[in-house]
Image: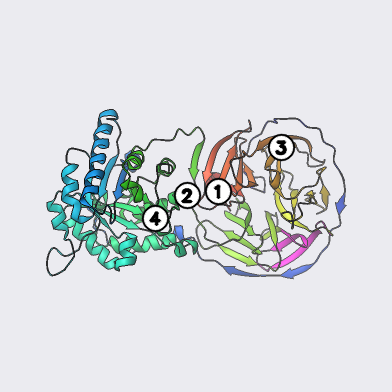
Amino acid sequence: SSNGRNKMASLRPLRPAGSSVRGAGKTLPAGRRVFKVHAEIAPPATFSTAKVPAVHPVISNVNLPDPKTITRTPFMAGNWKTNPTTLQQVHSLTAMLATMASNTARDKPDLDVEVAVFPPSVFLPVVKSMLAHTKIQVGVQDVHFEQKGAFTGSVAVGMVASLGCTHALVGHSERRTLFGDDDDSINKKVRAVLDAGLKPILCIGETKEEYVAGKAQAVCARQLAGALHNVSADEMRTKVTIAYEPVWAIGTGLTATPAIAQSVHAYIRQWMTDVYGAQVSHTVRIQYGGSVTPETVDTIMACPDVDGCLVGGASLLPDKFQRICNVREIDQTVKKLWAQEVVGCGCQLGESPVWDNSRQKMYWVDAPGQRLWEWDLATSARKWQFSETVGCVALMESDGHVLLGLERGMCDFNLETGVITTLSEFETGRNTRPNDGRTDKDGNFVIGSYNNNHRGDAKEIGGLWRMDAMSNKLTEILDYSFRCSNAICFTPDGSKMFFCDTPTRRVYTFDYNSRAPLSNRQLLYEMPNDLEGGPDGAQCDNMGHLWVAISGAGQVVRIGPDGLVNMTVELPVKCPTSCTFGGADLATLYIT
């Protein structure tokens, strides 16, 4: 973290380059002005409130396995919806599926994938008969919760059970939106399916409007709570499958990125852990549904909490459905991790996360939103609203104070009183503002600037400065100007500093001395052409690896001392901006 207490290690140089510093020793005068701002309390993270008391599971005393030993067999299901339209087409489709299933069983006997199809109810007997010699299971797309009676047009679950069907879809978004299925009726259907000895696939998911509003988790929690009322832990563990289908991705050609899918799936599993316990939640399979194709299935299935797919249109094309069911593990020479949202703060441009290890709190800023944030990892996050752009934040020795990079300059901010004291003006006369900064091991703050119009005029007018810990004077330490400073951080011995001008898409290392300009620039990493965006904020770990947020690519990459990416963190957002380590033992990466 910026106070130098983070675990880090050295990074060896790659490519030498000479340097001479422009403006070495040049300083800006310190000033002093006082202002006040007000503080507000933000709502807590949605992920931290996973328990839904409306669910009343019936917990049994069976001996459940250790979650660490549980493996989940992939489950691929094909929902034919109101297709095909004729019996002849059904015969053709089913015959091809049967042949492919037989060939797969012969040629790949070790392939461990469970497969089911869900044809229209009128075709169930035909499909069930034609697939009887295969391992493909057959289910029904919807059932009525009553066993029999005057319910014209409805299909009772006992009827499909008598045909030998094994599964039933419940709560599909099209049933919810087009036929008015609500949480109460869906719960009755789930209960009827279980009582008949069939296995329900419970479909949940949010609309595009709900997703954009950040309500995906809340919607899934409500739907889970409503549908699983009085469903026992035993039934969850042995019979129930959850299918997450973002409504905005069903039949639209749009697919949630793997990071989006994993984020919601992880939340669903956490919800089940809170309600049913870890042994049950680690057993339940969670499918992803929404325009799944052979081209996307492997990356979706690589997510640790995605256990299968509910396939729509592609399940009507036997070749494509076979390729989807023939899911393979991706050979990942680059290890992949998945980030989960913990604070829904709605930042326009979150920046400059810094961990206060002594107070166990995280700070970050929303630059254009003109806010400073504080969070203790447990309760609601607190924010302060300003009237100007807040470029960065750093810790100060004075208890209850932080250093802020504001448009007016570098300022001491009292968290309790709201008093702002200007310590040093910043690049007066230039169309710039403070942007990215970190504290070196001697307590000096290294801060780079941001051309406010760099996407318009592309002028390289920004400077890199060191703010003296004792005098507050700013000294320029880089011999060239740039557009947008980022990735400033240090190796643990303090001898190397990282830096990038984001539009160039290159990250450099420099020799660092707290009393001298930067020298010996060496290229560490250049983004590949197939990766969008640019390097943003960064932090170094205790092995000398640099973690860089790639804004525009939805990733944080870890770059080794050899300049190669050896790990990626996938995020459910496109533009991560910075990162740092925090929490117990500094073992968690936090990303704005």
> Is 410 colored magenta in this rendering?
yes
Q: Nearer the viewer, mark 4 or mark 1?
A: 4
Residue drawn where x is 30% and y is 39% of the image: 113
- The amino acid beneath tag 4 is Gly
Number of the label disc, if any, that sits on residue 509: 3
Give the percent coordinates (x, y) of residue 590: 56, 50
Within 10 Å of disc 3 (Cα), the crowding (few <14, some 14-19, many 20+) is many
C-alpha distance separating marks 4 and 3: 47 Å
Start and end of the magenta stretch?
Answer: 405-428
Between disc 1 and disc 3, whose residue precedes? 3
Tag 4–tag 1 contact (CB < 8 Å): no
Q: Position of residue 55 (x, y in %)?
A: 30, 62
Q: Main secondary structure of the magenta part?
A: strand
Query: Is 334 on the left-hand or right-hand side of 294?
Result: right
Look at mark 1 in the image and give the residue it sits on.
554
2 vs 3, front mark? 2
Say which of 364 and 63 sits in front.
Answer: 364
Residue bearing mark 4: 251
Q: In this rendering, would 363 be left or right of 147?
A: right
Mark 2, residue position: 257
> Marks 4/2: CA distance?
15 Å
* Three-letter residue code for mark 3: Thr
**Residue 435, quarter of the rendered image:** bottom right
Quick check: 30 above or below 489? Answer: below
- Which of pointers 4 and 3 lies earlier in the amino acid sequence? 4
The answer to whether residue 523 of the structure is visible from this angle is yes
Judging depth in this view, the residue of 11 and 200 nearest the camera is 200
Location of residue 432 in the rendering, given as x and y in whole percent from the top left corner = 77, 57
CA gap between label 1 and label 2 equals: 10 Å
